[in-house]
Image: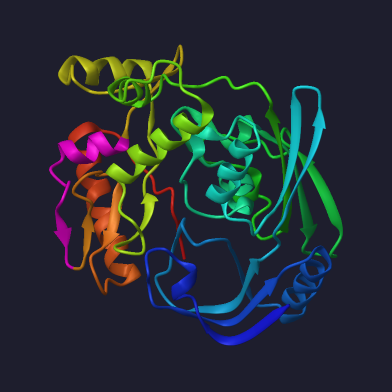
Amino acid sequence: MKVLSDYSLKAHNTFGIEASCRCFVEFSTLSEAQEAARLARDDGGRLLIVGGGSNLLLTRDFEGVVLHSAIMGVSAQLNGDEVLVTAGSGTDWDWLVGYCVSHGWYGMENLSLIPGEVGASAVQNIGAYGAEAKDIIYKVQAVRMIDGEVVWFSCEDCRYDYRDSRFKHEWKNQYLVTNVVYRLSKRFEPRLDYGNLRSELQRKGIGKPSAEQLRQVVIDVRRSKLPDPKEMGNAGSFFMNPVVGRRQFEQLLAQYPQMPHYFVDDAHEKVPAGWLIDQCGWKGRSLGRAGVHDRQALVLVNRGGATGQEIVSLCEQVRQDVLQKFGIEINPEVNII
């Protein structure tokens, strides 16, 4: 187990913000996770649990303990067409997706190239192209911070919602996620009706894609829209797509017939936040050293040397403009510290 003082967090946030923490603890086994929980309890100060840092915006040094999982490894239990895949919370998410696809275990393909680690999938309910982590999560193993007990939660226990779970609310900083079990299938059933996946496959002359082909198309589409954090600091999609009531949606659609939208239920519709931001003229614009990406307005970027506060200022200006133009409040998906 690593225990480091005055540790730089620049490598642990994909915005590339220079910030440090008073104490950094990295655990790589279940027993070390229990020990890390004890160290944090004994410290008694502020606590921050981080993964790959792809959903994190640091606005200042963190005067407390930062915990990070380095629990790796993958195992599988096969039962007919069903496959239960257990992965350590520190495992790279996209590596896991590729591993499962290569072994003929299906269900993760649309979630390809999402940055971050396995533990974050269970906390954040990551999602893309019509799929969400909750569709495949079977159960979650965690260490309870208050006493170091190992506990298991079912998918239902976690009360997943759009980019949300109990780990972000009443369970925040109460548990260290150590392993996640996913229920996958040996039968490949592609989801192609979200975004431009189907048209992109058709453009490549692929009528019935294999899982490998679908994964590659998702990767290609994401790379065409999203900047590489190694080249330009960012946290991927900065804002959640807002869900609006049916009446407001119909009024907006009458005013903006070209507005893209996705059915949620009879009373609600989802509107892409990127489109709203683009309509406000923000795509490609900057506010100081922080900017809106020129290919995907949903992404805020560090154009070089930006502070967390600069990115927050840009976030607030974008939110204000969207609210003023459309009467819709968009909220950050990123965890701002």
Q: Evaluate whether residue 274 shows in this view.
A: yes
Horizontal side, residue 271 vs residue 113: left or right: left
Q: Give the extent of the magenta segment.
A: 273-288
> Could you tell me residue 108's position as x and y percent?
57, 35
> Could you tell me residue 331's position as x and y percent?
38, 45
Near-viewer residue (116 or 6):
116
> Could you tell me residue 271's position as x and y percent?
33, 28
Figure check: 81 above or below 22: above
Near-viewer residue (71 or 266):
71
Horizontal side, residue 130 vs residue 137: left or right: left
Q: Evaluate whether residue 169 shows in this view.
A: no
Figure check: 213 above or below 248: below
Horizontal side, residue 110 vs residue 41: left or right: left
Quadrant for the N terminus, please: bottom right
**Who's the residue at 79% across and 59% down the image?**
143
Which colour style is shown?
rainbow
Residue 181 in the magenta stretch? The answer is no
